[in-house]
Amino acid sequence: MVIALDLEVAKKVFKSTDEGRSRAIDEYEQSVRYYNNKNDITRDKGGKDTLDDEGKKDSYIRKADNRISNGYHRILVDQKAQYVGGVVPTFDVEDDTLNNSVANVLGDNYARVFNRLVVNAANSGTAWLHYWTDEAGIFHYATIDPAQITPVYDGSLEQKLLAVRRTYEALDSETGDVYIYDEYWTDEQAQFFKHERDLDYSSLMYDYRVPVFDINTDEALENSYILKHDMGTVPFIAFMNNQDGTTDLQRYKGLIDVFDRVYSGFVNDVDDVQQVILILTNYGDAGSATEFKQKLKQDQVINLENYGDGDKSGLDKLTIDIPVQARDDLLDRTREAIFLHGQGVDPSKVEIGTNKTGVALKMIYTLLELKAAALESEFRPGLSSLIRAALHYLNDGKAELRHITQQWTRAAVKDDTEQADIVAKLANVTSDEAIAKSNPLVQDWQDELKLREQTTDSYDNPAARDNLED
């Protein structure tokens, strides 16, 4: 039996998890900034790209202060999300009726939610999904902002999830005050707390948000800060990005920063090279620099004094030389390193010809496949947990005992002709199910088996053939 946390215990629990929570939030927010193309180079400019050819007021020669942020992090994250989740994983619980029922429970949002889980995992190290049933008894599930989640594990080798703390900021519509809300979820109940944003946990109080009704009269009673649920487990599922639960950005952030700095410096030099400084020796007319520029523009001549032999009177110009080749080489090497350490596919380096075989195509995705495989191995238990939650919702008594098979398909450029040849050669010695799963033209192997069965029956039964044609 779970005992509700009193305020003093809740204060200790929240304080003890704050340090780890702050570190996780910092990493996540940094990843989100880079995902939204707001790299460190633009932080002084409010996170926006700026083109300013006279931004440095304290410099006489180098005045340009352009800040350009390059979105390589988003390219790599979206590339992984589409490679892994472009074709969402299918599942089999060894019961066709239940397969269809679970698919109906997950609904049309399954693909969208799965894609968001991959993106959140890449940016935070661990993505989180919450599921619940509403007042009408309908099953729901959704991704949760990773910055809101602090897990509490039991410390064993299996790292069993004991509870989840969810923290967020919101406006109290009744008082107009902004509060920090804390939810504490266990396998039996959720407790709700809040404290004022500008105060510490000394102001922690219960958040009475759960309506309580008299089961005999259905009359509303006083609200409670405890919500009982019958999920049987903590209704939050972790989806780790890799075995370490680390973000993708930490692998190549420094390289992106180097690229941004070199690229922006290149743009600055292009602007500054247009700033030609004239050096005058023994200029005859007095006046300001502005007057000199106006006279030069109007008369196209300047008046210089000459004092005989050895006089160095004249006009020189001071310009800036741009080491173009060196910067091009550095940018190319940095870009190559970004995709290498980010384990992605650089589109500018992919050359697809008519003679590309299936093996050659697989080589292009070697690094991306390594990264995707690491994510898949950590996502599989989470996806199975979601499917079991749906089975529990469907009142399946064998939900915990069922063997769940998952089929993951990579959304990559493939040689379908080569795959079709393999399927054709093995058709006589391979099960119909394996053939349906491997057929490059098939999206849903279960539907394919049903269609094949109907087609086979039509050859033996003229009436069935007529119905199939209709």
Image: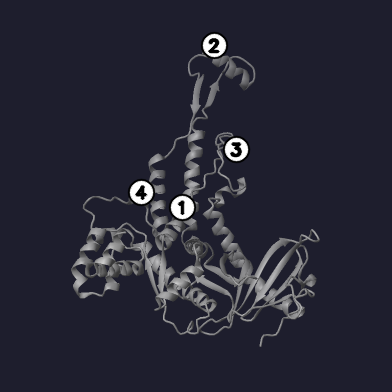
Residue 34 is left or right of residue 405, and the answer is right
Q: Within 10 Å of the Cα at label 2, are there few (<14), some (14-19), or many (20+) other Cα atoms?
A: few
Q: Nearer the viewer, residue 133 or 35?
A: 133
Q: Earlier in the sequence, mark 2 or mark 3?
A: 3
Measure the alpha-carbon separation of dots 2 and 3: 31 Å
Query: Please, what is the three-letter code of the amino acid marked with disc 3?
Result: Gly
- Please, what secondary structure does the residue beneath circle 2 have? helix
Badge 4 vs badge 1, beta-carbon distance below 8 Å: no
Q: Earlier in the sequence, mark 4 or mark 1?
A: 1
> Which is closer to the viewer, label 2 or label 3?
3
Is residue 245 visible to the viewer in this orientation of the structure? no
Residue hosting label 3: 55
Query: Please, what is the three-letter code of the amino acid marked with disc 1?
Result: Tyr
Residue hosting label 2: 299
Query: Please, what is the three-letter code of the amino acid marked with disc 4?
Result: Ser
> Is residue 445 depicted above or below 296 in this figure?
below
Badge 2 vs badge 3, beta-carbon distance below 8 Å: no
Measure the alpha-carbon separation of dots 3 and 4: 33 Å
Residue furthest out toward the bottom? 1
> Which is closer to the viewer, label 3 or label 1?
1
Q: Within 10 Å of the Cα at label 1, are there few (<14), some (14-19), or many (20+) other Cα atoms?
A: many
Find residue 348 and name its label: 4
The structure residue drawn at horizontal position 78% and vertical position 75%, both measured from the top left corner, is: 219
- Please, what secondary structure does the residue beneath circle 1 have? helix
> Which is closer to the viewer, label 1 or label 2?
1
Residue 242 rendering spot, x and y as whole percentages: 46, 70
Q: Nearer the viewer, residue 64 or 37?
A: 37
